[in-house]
Image (cartoon, helix red, strand yellow):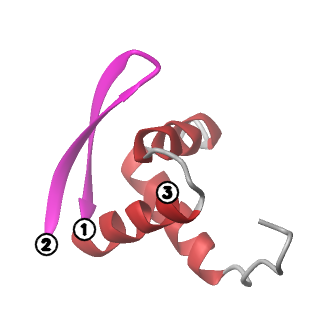
Amino acid sequence: MIRKHSATLHGHRTSFSLEDAFWQELKAIAEMRAMPLAQLIAEIDDQRTPDSNLSSALRVYVLEWLKSPPASPGEA
């Protein structure tokens, strides 16, 4: 199911829509990186191309994270 979510990025409130599976993975990634979810979303937002919307950028980030090889000890 697709759900609408909200976050404050650089002092501005924004919303985006994500499927539950992407939302759960995004939260897990933030936890693995030991950072607040809002900070991860802001980082992804800062790195996305101007022609990409935030929802798509979040999905692509999760996909790329899941496809990347696991970090060796000491690389995280």
| Location of mark 2 (residue) | 1
Say which mark, if any, is on residue 53: none
What secondary structure is marked by label 3? helix
Is 53 placed left or right of 6 in the picture? Answer: right
Say which mark, if any, is on residue 19: 1
The residue segment tinted magenta is 1-19
Q: Nearer the viewer, mark 1 or mark 3?
A: 3
Say which mark, if any, is on residue 30: 3
Quadrant in the picture for the C terminus: bottom right
Sequence order check: which comes first, mark 3 or mark 2? 2
Do labels 2 and 1 touch, CB within 8 Å? Answer: yes
Q: Amino acid at mark 2?
A: Met
Q: Amino acid at mark 1?
A: Glu
Dominant SS type (magenta): strand
- Examine the rendered structure and indicate whether residue 58 appears above or below residue 72: above
Nearest the viewer among 54 and 9 is 9
Residue at (59%, 34%) from the top-left corner?
Answer: 46
**Residue 34, percent from left and from top:** 56, 54
Do labels 3 and 2 touch, CB within 8 Å? Answer: no
Q: Nearer the viewer, mark 3 or mark 2?
A: 3
The residue furthest top is: 11
